[in-house]
Image (cartoon, coloured by chain):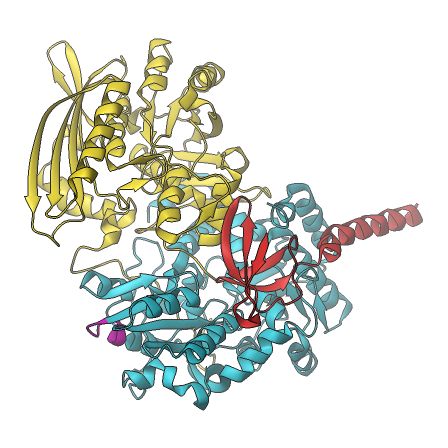
Amino acid sequence: MSIEGEDPLFRSGRVNFGGVIKQINLAYVPEAKVGDYVLVHVGFAINTIDEEEANQVFEYLREMDELADLESNEAK
Amino acid sequence: MKFIDEYREPKAARRYAQAIRHITTRPWTIMEVCGGQTHAIVKFGVDELLPSEVTLVHGPGCPVCVTPVELIEKAIEIASTPGVVFCSFGDMLRVPGTSKDLLSVKAQGGDIRIVYSPLDALKVARENPRRQVVFFAVGFETTAPANAMAVYQAFQQGISNFSMLVAHVLVPPAMEAILSSPSNLVRGFLAAGHVCAVMGYSEYEPIARKYHVPIVVTGFEPLDILQGIYMTIRQLEEGRAEVENQYTRAVSRNGNQPAQELIKDVFQVVPRKWRGVGEIAASGLGLKPKFAAFDAETRFGVAHRIVEESSECISGSVLQGVKKPHDCPAFGAVCTPEHPLGATMVSNEGACAAYYRYRRVRLQDSATASQESES
Amino acid sequence: MKPEDMPEFYCPVPINQYASVMLAHGGGGKLMHELIESLFLPLFSNPSLAARHDGAVLEFGAHKLAFTTDSYVVHPIFFPGGDIGTLAVNGTINDLAMCGARPLYLSAGFILEEGLPMETLKRVVESMSRAASEAGVQLVTGDTKVVDRGKGDGIYINTAGIGIVQAGRSIAPAGVIPGDAVLLSGDIGRHGIAIMAVREGLAFESAIESDCAPVAEPVLALIEAGIEIHCLRDLTRGGLASALVEIAEAARIHVGIQEAAIPVREDVRGACEILGFDPLYVANEGRFVAFVPSRDTERALALMRSHPLGAGASLIGSVTRDPAGLVTMRSSIGASRIVDMLSGEQLPRIC
């Protein structure tokens, strides 16, 4: 939501968890910008979430379904 | 909440479960090595959706579970020292030592504080310059960057009243210990997503090759776990043994470089004792000599305290329906719901036992269920 | 199945026998219940205590009186949505309401720590006065003690309350029968999170306030409408889970609930994720569960929803005979698990 701090080690930001805001250390995600989603563990952001990959779980399912359809079509 | 709720979607969960059922032709035993994953599996009942051929074994994935008695005793000794402020994550407070836990020390007057981050402990040190502040640094590689940062900042800012009781453990050596046992039954692993977010997953590739086991880096939400299981079984059914990444939205092969660098600056690989087992070589992290001043064991003179792992765990679990923890089987054995490795649930207070009792209830006729639930 | 050469990792099951009183003994969980069962109940045994309900129902000729007592030790004294005073008044009112009684009179005993600012005390007492008059109850007797600095946490309040039972049928766990519907009066977790937020310095986009409130009105409305209430329980320490487990165990029935039906606000959920808490176990102070015959479900929900305090009322589950003594919950992905009682305070889970 907002980022402050000059020194990379002490760089921190206000992170929003569904309406709760907490100050989180961003030293390990130097590329993070306001608006990004991050994975937080014990007060530190340990990675940014790749939004494109976020759909992968559902893409995979779709592909499986398509494959299943193909297989059942072939079987006919 | 975004990036959480979507991965708890019931229809998708059922479809994954169906897909797993569809490809499974033989019994497989899969281990997951993260307390968070075990928790999600129990909380959402993921294993209930799986076909009976798939057995999920809960591995040594929670620092609570693997912290040796000796370390708890050291923690208790430090925390009982007058003037010390002992900071810890909540779930460590109820892990039993030989006769007490940290909560008992608190009841007897110890200044023990629950924190959510090692930086909170550092803050306490800053605000109380005349007190010794100790942080109980347990955890796998996921927590290491945070702990490294705390020590680094303490060093940079000269916060000399701060120290850490370090008990970091590493996942790959634990996995090798399990896999190299002659009676191991585990055929596939779900690697801990958050550990890999930090460390990447290249270090699992040699393990997959050496022991011919598929390893799938998996997230923590139910859909992540189901997809991870699917990918593992697919590999098993196809005879492959590779490292795959299910948790692509947060994990890359090389992991988080800045985090790894700071870990390397502050920590070094050391032998570590694991609860009940004893020492495994190169299985933990300890402070490098440059930061040795911040090592609580040295500062409080408890470094040479040796406590033998007793062959009997402290029980007190008649309430929870678990007989003797003795009877909890080892990793790599078939850890079925009848014999869960309950430690990861200490932080959830008997949810493991609840899970266990629930299984017994389901397997019995409802006629006898009420008798079982009373025992 | 334990080969000798296997590495053996042992399960550190928590201790549950302590030589001294632990915080967990006040947590609303197993340790507290054990303390009550093994120490208190045997020494004071009588039918009222044996009912194991929030208050005692006593017969005085033609009337039934409900009688309850409570102590308030909350810290911080002031929190978003209330303070120790409003808690004391509303908590007592709610215990009486859970017996199906109209709350009438309260007593209040104050244990004050030397050094407590007068201004603080004044604010608390003013809160209590407001809460009492809003709820239509009178504080009729009280007591004040002061302890040395360092021997108290600012202020402790003990209360007792009396009300007249309005319900014809006895309202207690023993009244629950298979087939009953389990209704929850609103969203859970606000009070505990409001307190934790102050303690942990969490900020919220719009502050989470405690749900501290008197729930006598919606309850009395149910009684007046002729709904046959089998049991009531207000959710306090230990949260929704503990309340349901207590009832399931006392009544020797099974309670099955649906996770998707339990209302939790988004920001409460977010705070729980950060703090490592499960909303099921977080404290509430203005919520209750009602066990009613399933045929009365719609009517009861409509009545509850017509009150501001019951606006979020929902049907969260039902009662069956077996497995007796257990509460099970169907999770959002469709699988079930046992909801157990915690042994003590919920410890924040990190890993």
Of residue C200 and residue B11, the one placed in the foreground of this image is C200
Let me know if residue C86 is in the magenta part. Answer: no
Residue drawn at 12 percent across, 31 percent down? C46
In the rendered view, does B212 fall on the left or right side of C235? right
Residue B72 percent coordinates (x, y): 32, 73
Residue drawn at 44 percent across, 64 percent down? B117
Q: The yellow chain is which one?
A: C
Residue drawn at 33 percent across, 23 percent down? C215
Q: The red chain is which one?
A: A
In the rendered view, does B158 fall on the left or right side of B145? left
Q: Which chain is cyan?
A: B
Residue B105 percent coordinates (x, y): 23, 66
Of residue B35 and residue C130, the one placed in the foreground of this image is C130
- State which region is magenta: B76-83
Residue C218 percent coordinates (x, y): 37, 18
Relative height, residue B43 to residue B242 (above, below): above
In the rendered view, does C49 fall on the left or right side of B285? left
In the rendered view, does B370 fall on the left or right side of B209? left
Residue drawn at 68 percent across, 77 percent down? B202
Relative height, residue C120 to residue A35 (above, below): above
Of residue B148 and residue B61, the one placed in the foreground of this image is B148
Say if residue B238 shows up in the picture: yes
Say if residue B363 shows up in the picture: no
Q: Residue C101 sits in which quadrant? A: top left
Q: Residue furthest front?
A: A6
Residue B230 percent coordinates (x, y): 70, 58
